[in-house]
Image: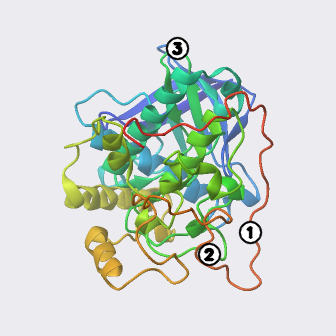
Amino acid sequence: MSVPLRYRRATTGYVTEADAAAEDAQFRAGEYLMGRLVKLDDGTVLRQHRVPAGDARGPGMGYDRLDSEIYAGRMLHQAVGWLDYPAELACLYGDSEVDAESGGGAAADPYSLIEPYRGEPLTEAIVYLDDEDTELFTDSLLSALCWLAAAGIAHRALGPDTVRWDAGRRQVQLTDFSRSAIFGSDRTSVTGPAEWIAPESRPGRRYGAVGPQDDMWAAGRLMFFVQHQGAPPRERRELAGTGLDALLGPPEGRPTASEALHGRGRQDPAAGSGQGRTWLADGRGRFLRLRDGKHHGALVPPEFLADINWPASATEASARGPVPGSPAGPPPWAPRAPGMPETPGPLASYPPPAPGNGEPSGTSEPRQRSRAKRRPWGRGAG
């Protein structure tokens, strides 16, 4: 089936018109989104993500998910700048938003164009990863999160279905930015299995503002998941001695991806990229102007009303004391005194759930435990 496309190229900003051959088969492309493959005249094959007809077009659903994906893709391109786009991140090729001020008009059925994903979902690749792959996985995952932090974005939906493993490159690739959020914005509830959604973002428990530590909770569990070939941890004490328990405390006490990489003797690949908070605010402003041209009169999602001075706000909040319900005492990643036992208990029980609010359910069954031994997640970890 031939379809006309009119889109804005992510790398140049130019509006392009092209005819494409679209496949009839569709697939899930994220929460409330569907995708299909399209082939441009020059032979380029892309994923076209769209909002399906029906209930998925309601407020706070498909269009907001698509906007989040497009915004994340654009800001990542700006953060990378003249450098090669990191293979660890799904890449936005273009989107149907064009500048209304330039007379471009608006697309009747908005979409994003994403370069084909690399590798396999972890749910499939997990069975053949060896010990060396496990180390490379950790470095690559943290590197990907460093690039996200450089763009001022948290993924917020990391899990075995959104993180892929490219066996040829021996790298991860993060996909599906439809639930991403801007640093400094108020946390909204994230749907999904509880074992991959950080407690501070679950329904009935969400609190605080999004920051670079938000993805580290799921990252720690993914590292354990890979080390144990598909067995997620059930209790925090399972991670004792691995260093991963440092990532499962309250967000204000977790290390960032950059700090974790430094702990492994590696450098942050995104260090020095971007132009600071003013650049992030300008990028968001441009995006919202284009969004208004496409969805005229649409409400701005709360995640785009971010506090651009969030680092200062976070410092002030920290000075006021711990979040109610969070553990007292030293930060959870601080070295434990010799002989001090770890307090057993459920994973991340902060903050206390509001009465009457249920939690997402669902757990993954372990596939096999042939590498059940514990190992430090950081090369320098003790």
Q: Earlier in the sequence, mark 3 or mark 2?
A: 3
Residues at badges 1 and 2 in contact (C-beta under 8 Å)? yes
Q: Is residue 113 left or right of residue 355?
A: left
Tell me the kind of residue under disc 1: Glu
Quarter of the N terminus within the rendering: top right
Q: Secondary structure at mark 1?
A: loop
Residues at badges 3 and 1 in contact (C-beta under 8 Å)? no
Tell me what residue is drawn at x 62 percent, y 34 percent. Answer: 226
Tell me what residue is drawn at x 42 percent, y 69 percent. Answer: 185
The image shows residue 246, relative to residue 368, as above or below, that is below
Q: Is residue 210 visible?
A: no
Tell me the kind of residue under disc 3: Gly
Residues at badges 3 and 2 in contact (C-beta under 8 Å)? no
The image shows residue 274, relative to residue 336, as above or below, that is above
Quarter of the C terminus within the rendering: top left
Residue 10, position as x, y percentages in the image = 37, 37
Whole-Å distance between the Cαs marked 3 and 1? 38 Å
What residue is disc 1 on? 359
The image shows residue 199, relative to residue 123, as above or below, that is below
Q: Is residue 220 visible?
A: yes
Q: Nearer the viewer, residue 203 or 299?
A: 203
Q: Nearer the viewer, residue 278 or 43?
A: 278
Residue 227, position as x, y percentages in the image = 61, 34
Tell me the kind of residue under disc 2: Arg
Residue 16, position as x, y percentages in the image = 39, 32
Q: Secondary structure at mark 2?
A: loop
What residue is disc 2 on? 205
